[in-house]
Amino acid sequence: MDDQKKSIDSVLEKPLDDAVEAWERLDDAALTDEVVAYYDALADVTQRVEGVMGHHYRRGDTETPSNGLVDSQGPSAQGGSGAVEETGNGDQQKQKKEGQVDDALGVEGVDFYEGSLDDVDPSEWQVPPHCIPIHTDVVRYDWTALSRACQFDVIMMDPPWQLATANPTRGVALGYSQLTDKDIQNLPIPKLQKNGFLFIWVINAKYQFTLDLFEQWGYTLVDEIVWVKMTVNRRLAKSHGFYLQHAKEVCLVGKRGDDIPGMKKGVKSDIIYAERRGQSQKPEEIYELIEDLVPNGKYLEIFGRKNNLKNFWVTVGNEVTGQGLPPQSPA
């Protein structure tokens, strides 16, 4: 194995121009050998990185890491109904079979999945150059200055709903702090928007409460968007619900005031088929839908995290920097 690594290292250390010139002189058989060596090099690098990260497994293995399911984004607070991390459980780590629930455990409005270095998209960790993150505790934030500076055409939020059942998380440790209905109700949404759309991601238990919020804030329910969650293999990404297995999330759409100048109706479908992503991370299609509905608009996302940052969006949340909670947030 050491000799193989030395050979791989020597291949990787060759100048690119020399390698290209050498490959052009190879016949088919020799080129095949080079390709095999390349894949061996990739496997070696992957093994080394996984060793550094403490993940002694590769994609496709049926065995999960020793710490159970890994939250690829890390724990956080008040960041929306996103991923959770489960402590190890041997019964939950068995290989899944076709037709079974894809998640070992599940909570409505909450995602988690087996983490792997292969699944990390570097773009998800890069801050877009034209985004406007506001790192603050949403509940304690003074919204007055923002409301005076800008009236938003579209507001979207994924509240960290408080789960009120007897055993709401079924033993799963949530990676964020839940907010009470009163906390969410007290958000000054009407001050931030006189005319426009409000998108709220809901769970079944908060459906009626959200409809009541629309009425209280002066909005009319105009549409509903359903995100059908898929796995990388394009199967339904199912998790447990109270009665049925859940493989979707719902976003209610309210409208307030007059039509926004330049608004385009009928531009997108109300159903999104997209892969389940990282913690509290909604599909890219929802942002595309909003920007197609209201081109060149003024967009605000509340309860956002670093992986929610988008160009030309204002994102407010206590995890937008990825560096921990702001000073005024409770631990």
Image (cartoon, rainbow, N blue to C red):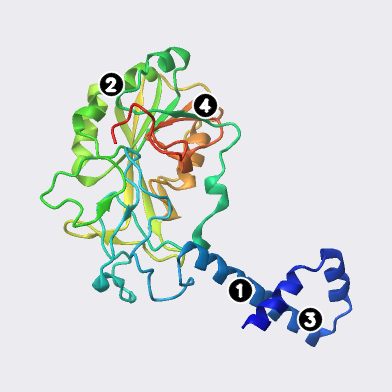
Identify the residue at horizontal 38%, vertical 17% (top origin).
194
Q: Are marks 1 and 2 in contact (CB under 8 Å)?
A: no
Q: Which residue is mark 4?
A: 297
Location of mark 3 (residue): 31
Q: Mark 3 to mark 1: distance in Å?
A: 20 Å
**For the point 45% across and 39% down, which residue is it?**
323
Which of marks 4 and 2 precedes in the sequence?
2
Judged from the image, the secondary structure of the residue bearing numbered disc 4 is loop
Estimate how packed mark 2 is, as few (under 14), some (14 to 19) or many (20 or more) residues with alpha carbons within 10 Å.
Answer: some
The nearer-to-camera label among 4 and 1 is 1
Q: Which residue is mark 2?
A: 218
What element does badge 3 sit on?
A: helix
For marks 1 and 2, the one nearer the N-term is 1
Q: CA distance from mark 4 to mark 3?
A: 53 Å
Q: Quadrant of the N terminus?
A: bottom right
Does residue 193 appear in the picture of this structure? Answer: no
The amino acid type found where label 3 is placed reads Leu
Up-down relation of residue 82 to residue 51 (above or below)? above
Q: CA distance from mark 3 to mark 2?
A: 68 Å
Q: Is residue 216 left or right of residue 237?
A: left
- Circle 3 packing at 10 Å, graded few (<14), some (14-19), many (20+), is some
Which dot, 3 or 2, sits closer to the camera? 3
Image check: 298 left or right of 157? right
